[in-house]
Image (cartoon, grey):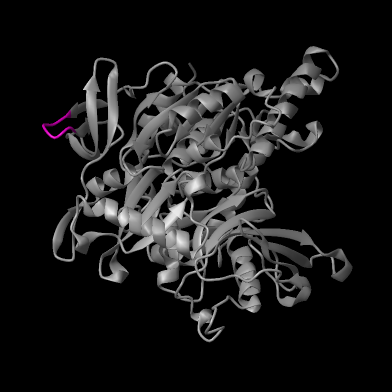
Amino acid sequence: MADVSLLSAPWRNAPLDQPIGWRCAAPLSQAAVSWSVLHGRIGAWQALLDSLAPQGQRWLLHLREPLEFAAALLACWERGDSVVLPADDRPETLTGVDRLTRGRLGDVAEGHRAGPDGGIPRWGTLDADALALSLYTSGSSGDPQRLDKCFAQLDAELSMHARLWPLEGRLVISQVSHQHIYGLLFAILRPLCERAPMATSLCRYPETLSDWLARLATMHHSASAGVSSDTLDAPPGAVLITAPPPLERLPRELDWQAAPQMLSHIHSSGAPLSQAASDGALEALGVPVSEIYGSSETGGIAWRIQQQNSCWTPLPGVEIRDDAQGTLWLRSPFLDSADWQRQADRISLETSGFRLLGRVDHILKVGGKRLSLTSMDRTLGTYPGVLGARTIALPERNTRLGAIVQLEPALIPQDHTTRRALTEALRQHLLETFESTVIPRYWRFVDAWPSNSQGKLAGAVVTQLFRDLQNRRVPRWLGVEFEGDERCRVTLEVPERLIYLQGHFDAKPVVPGVVIVQWAIELAREHLGLKGEFQGLERVKFPRLLCPGDRVELLLFLAPDPPRGERNVKLAFTLKGRQATHASGKALFSSSGDR
């Protein structure tokens, strides 16, 4: 095998006429992006950095385009700089990490982005013990914690991946963010070290994945038939980097005929995949899913293919043991310490590996009483129709508990009466085991487990689920499903304490129509990146009253509005309940802001 060590910097001597990027939706003649282009982008970023500060800085880096992210990252490393990777580009996230860095690079607010290609890049030295990057935990059990990674840690894990699952020139298609360690390693650093092409954009939707694989298969068929010699430059196949949420929602009606031909590996991480989802992915895509268990703190720990073994197999070099309580302990070459490290998961050791038994008990005080949140989650899980549950301490509510409960779709409450009845039934179920002072006060019922792009219930997602407690002007947010770059479906409930219900009306409170329109605009700005100045409304209708406790889906769709200007935008919105439509209409926005 060729040297794929990160420390040897394989990108420096890569054949400049060979592809490192692949524009999957472009015409064949424009699809490949050569190493020479990447080198030019590295040089451009270095020229920008040189104009901003001397070497040895730390930069905040957030770029959505994989190849551009890779160029900026390598420019920093080769200059002797390190980077801080924020989990997302929300203002509150960036404000929290700005103090650690010299400035922002990328497509974030107040950021810098390199201009035209800057010529030949300068190569430096990668010191094994030097700081390469800092990133953050998901924050699902508290504030996100910063994690520092040196080059040697990254190198050890990358070399192991190359031995287990060599890319061999295949196209790397990613459905996960490279701002997190899993996406960074598998979708960015592995292609750079193994000199394999990467898709130049994230593959967010199953329709896109189906189309890309079909196009790749067409290229190969054309090459084998001798139609065009250019197709010989097409990658020999593809590797999919994904997570449980996309795999759990694979539409069976799409054409997946090309998937078994083109996909050689499917990697999933972030959370264990259910057996049903694993089997469903194999049936649709024709390739078994290789799951990877690990964390931002530890790196990879173990892997499995469920159709071969339901137990987890430790990754090469990782040692596993348990203690009297069944707690997982590990030693790993991917950590900065050679000592045994205690983890937050319980395991059962078996001859063929180990099984995950859930998290170690999370103990805290609620109302002066010690409570195991883990035990409460398990108890909620025994109620008929409950598919999963997580209890959350809400510090801003004097540590009162919130509960996130995933239910079978038929049991999801649709109005105040059924919601109240379900809440009381769950409270009574918990009272058989727990004292009344520790029972959750705030409930969120979902039909799909809420998670970020990595498949985790991250702190930012928890904040969204309970933000109506802090702001009585917003709806109760219960999840979003994207149906393309310009379309999404947001699940909402009307909080009973919504401030706009006061005086509107005393006999039967209803949500004012203007509030519904405002919600649609604010959620389109949040989820679809809508910008520009509001200009007016068209065809707005409110055929059915929206009342406290009602559960609805808000469909949002952005489209250009050429009659009013080339860059003007029209937002179409529809608010639907289970039985009727509550509102619909269109909002117009000027071109003073970009989407």
310 up-or-down from 444: above or below: above
584 up-or-down from 215: above or below: below
505 up-or-down from 265: above or below: below
Can you name the residue that lies furthest to the top here? Answer: 225
Residue at the image point whose x is 33% and y is 24% from the top: 312
Q: Nearer the viewer, residue 255 or 126?
A: 255
Report whether 370 appears left or right of 550: left
Report whether 263 appears left or right of 462: right
Is the stretch drawn in magenta largely helix, strand or loop? loop
Asked if one can make out residue 1 in the rendered structure from this viewpoint, the answer is yes
Residue at the image point whose x is 71% and y is 76% from the top: 534
Asked if one can make out residue 130 in the rendered structure from this viewpoint, the answer is no
Q: Nearer the viewer, residue 238 or 42?
A: 238
Instruction: Pinpoint residue 377: horizontal percent, then vertical percent.
Output: 29, 47
Can you name the residue that lies furthest to the right here? Answer: 563
Total labels drawn? 0
Taking the magenta stretch, the answer to whether it contains residue 559 is no
Quadrant in the rendering for residue 463: bottom left
Residue at the image point whose x is 24% and y is 51% from the top: 373
Can you name the residue that lies furthest to the left here? Answer: 324
247 up-or-down from 232: above or below: below
Q: Nearer the viewer, residue 392 or 93?
A: 392
- The magenta region covers 322-326
